[in-house]
Image (spheres, rainbow, N blue to C red):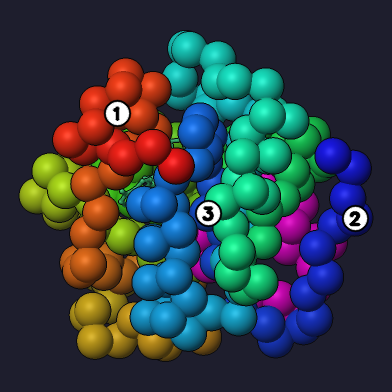
Amino acid sequence: MTREFPIAVPGMRIGLLGGSFDPPHAGHLQISEVALQRFRLDRVWWLVSPGNPLKTRGPAPLSDRLAACRELVQNPRIVVTDLEARLGTRMTADSIALLRQHYRGVRFVWLMGSDNLVQFDQWDRWRDIAQTVPIGVLARPGTRLAARQSRAATILRPWRLPEAGAGMLGDVPPPAWVQINLPMSPLSSTAIRRGDQSSGEPR
Ligand SMILES: Nc1ncnc2c1ncn2[C@@H]1O[C@H](COP(=O)(O)OP(=O)(O)OP(=O)(O)O)[C@@H](O)[C@H]1O
Ligand SMILES: O=C(O)c1ccc[n+]([C@@H]2O[C@H](COP(=O)([O-])O)[C@@H](O)[C@H]2O)c1
């Protein structure tokens, strides 16, 4: 499981997709591919979380989730990492701060599904996150309206880019965010854990 910190050079645009990945699924792959293309990113790093600070249920062991992610990902521009375990962080604000220190000059973009925008205002120091890195939101079925009406989206509205401006996201100074509306994936880890074949396919 021990691997080096991934390599990145100044000027690279790197999307950070944090998640439990319990288990990883094709929806994670799809939003990573869309983010690479639409936000003109050089890489997407999956930050496989030791545990979501807002979730009471603990996920499967980190080593199992990392192994499953590495088995699923074939695209060399999507990099599976255990950076939060290495850095000793759980809060996204801390992870981003340490990554920016470690990778000077790299342009990080925070990525999340629209379900996470709905509760983004409950995250630790969420305003700092928005002021530190641009944010790319990937629409998720059933959460687009709630995301648009969320407290965080309302407060951050002046800094929202039009979807047509998504390609600039990695280059504009934060705060800046954009929501990509298509294509959407109905997959979710919860559905897969429940064995619900209609909304979550097996990996
Ligand atoms: N189908 C999807 N469409 C858009 N975003 C998604 C999708 N699946 C996951 N994401 C996003 O990927 C990130 C990591 O997701 P996570 O590992 O929690 O998977 P999940 O399917 O949301 O799991 P769970 O059902 O346990 O909450 C989050 O920002 C989440 O919003
Ligand atoms: O920092 C926080 O307060 C915070 C609160 C909730 C979620 N997050 C992060 O959001 C990402 C998605 O979490 P999850 O569990 O929905 O996959 C993951 O990187 C979490 O660490 C972060």
Q: Amino acid at mark 1?
A: Ala
Instruction: Categorize mark 1 by other alpha carbons within 10 Å: few (<14), some (14-19), many (20+).
Output: some
- Does 101 sit above or below residue 18? below
Residue 135 versus residue 35: which sits nearer the camera?
A: 35
Q: Crowding near pointer 3: few (<14 within 10 Å), some, many (20+)? A: many
Residue identifier under label 1: 191
Secondary element under disc 2, as helix, strand or loop, is loop
Comparing labels 2 and 1, the label whose residue is closer to the camera:
1
Question: Which is nearer the N-term, disc 2 or disc 1?
Answer: 2
Say if the magenta span includes residue 165: no
Q: Which mark is residue 17?
A: 3
Q: Is residue 139 above or below residue 34?
A: above
Q: Earlier in the sequence, mark 2 or mark 3?
A: 2
Q: CA distance from mark 2 to mark 3?
A: 18 Å
- What's the residue at 32%, 19% (across, down)? 194
Q: Is residue 169 visible?
A: no
Quadrant placement of the N terminus: top right
Marks 1 and 3, how far apart at CA: 20 Å
The disc labelled 3 sits on which kind of residue?
Answer: Leu
Q: Residue at x 78, y 74 (%)?
A: 8
Residue type, label 2: Glu
Q: SS of the residue at dot 1?
A: helix
Q: Is mark 3 within 8 Å of ligand 1?
A: yes
Disc 1 or 3, which lies upstream in sequence? 3
Is disc 1's CB within 8 Å of ligand 1?
yes
Residue at mark 2: 4
Q: Residue 143 appears at what percent x and percent y?
A: 17, 44
Q: Which residues are magenta?
A: 94-111
Residue at 68% x, 39% y: name it: 66
